[in-house]
């Protein structure tokens, strides 16, 4: 059981997007549309199943999910979205990844580049920071939902690679290939998750001071607020003593 600070890898889904329900639903719908282009059957299309599960966990209405699937399969008219990964550096040499779904690459590139520049960073070339991150399935489970021993047994048998006790919650990591198996095992065991997603984890983190942390937070929140951005991930590590001040 390894220790882990969830501040060491900031994936800005946060409560911030939950307060902007319409924007969140728009992002989830795009994710479903793109996944459904590879086939509208969730049983045969794991990307679609993941997108639907994520939408349901965020209380997206069933008819909205169905409409997005039909747009993806071509039964309903829809914009065409490109999947793009933008990479760059923030203040202090912090690495930042932005996963994008856009119907206009030129518009989005200009908006993302501007956000980096006004907050003291710069948008880099493809591959400049992606190598620093590893894709992993991540589940967060309230500590009240199960015991550590039971979770350890169920998750590892399903293919999980690591389980961490964070106090109020457990965090389970797995490879993207075993994500659905672990998800199904937790669901079958009646273990509730507060979040379940495939994200990127930084191999190494960068410590920053208070002023740099403030600027980076503004940059990350600005990126997250962009309609075309699906997720923002950074390798910034904000020391515990600074978190309270930032809050």
Image (cartoon, rainbow, N blue to C red):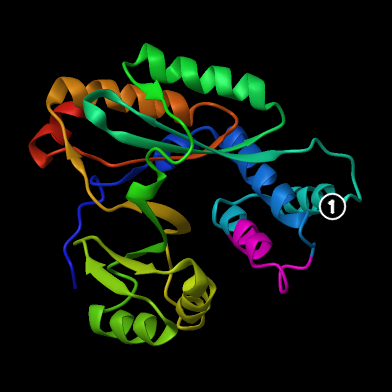
Image quadrant containing the C terminus: top left
Q: Is residue 223 above or below residue 146?
A: above
Toward the viewer: 229 or 93? 93
User: According to the image, label 1 marks what residue?
Assistant: 70
Picture coordinates of residue 177, whole percent (x, y): 51, 72
**Magenta segment includes 166:** no
Look at 42% across and 34% down and name the residue there: 16
Which image quarter: residue 195?
bottom left
Which image quarter: residue 237?
top left
**Magenta segment includes 46:** yes
Picture coordinates of residue 41, whole percent (x, y): 78, 68
Q: Is residue 46 above or below residue 103?
A: below
Q: Is residue 147 left or right of residue 38?
A: left
Toward the viewer: 21 or 206? 206
Q: Is residue 51 above or below residue 88?
A: below
Stretch in magenta: 41-53
Magenta stretch: dominant secondary structure: helix
Q: Is residue 43 above or below residue 7?
A: below
Q: Residue furthest left?
A: 241
Image quadrant containing the N terminus: bottom left
- Disc tally is 1
Look at 48% across and 66% down and name the residue there: 176
Look at 57% across and 56% down and name the residue there: 54
Look at 40% across and 27% down and name the residue there: 221
């Amino acid at each position: 059981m390894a220790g882990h600070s969830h501040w060491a890898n900031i994936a800005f889904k946060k409560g911030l997007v939950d307060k902007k329900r319409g924007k969140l639903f728009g992002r989830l719908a795009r994710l479903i549309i793109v996944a459904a282009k590879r086939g509208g059957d969730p049983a045969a299309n794991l990307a679609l199943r993941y997108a639907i599960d994520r939408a349901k966990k965020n209380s997206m209405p069933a008819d909205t999910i169905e409409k997005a699937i039909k747009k993806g399969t071509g039964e309903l008219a829809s914009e065409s979205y490109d999947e793009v990964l933008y990479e760059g550096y923030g203040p202090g040499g912090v690495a930042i990844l932005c996963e994008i779904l856009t119907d206009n690459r030129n518009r989005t590139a200009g908006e993302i580049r501007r956000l980096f520049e006004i907050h003291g960073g710069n948008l880099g070339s493809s591959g400049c920071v992606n190598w620093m991150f590893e894709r992993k399935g991540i589940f967060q489970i309230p500590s009240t939902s199960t015991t550590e021993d039971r979770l350890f047994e169920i998750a590892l048998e399903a293919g999980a690679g690591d389980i961490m006790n964070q106090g109020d919650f457990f965090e389970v990591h797995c490879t993207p290939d075993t994500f659905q198996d672990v998800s199904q095992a937790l669901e079958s065991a009646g273990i509730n998750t507060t979040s379940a997603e495939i994200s990127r984890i930084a191999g190494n983190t960068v410590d920053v001071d208070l002023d740099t942390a403030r600027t980076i937070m503004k940059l990350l929140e600005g990126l997250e607020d962009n309609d075309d951005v699906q997720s923002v991930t950074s390798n910034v590590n904000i020391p515990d003593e600074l978190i309270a001040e930032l809050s």
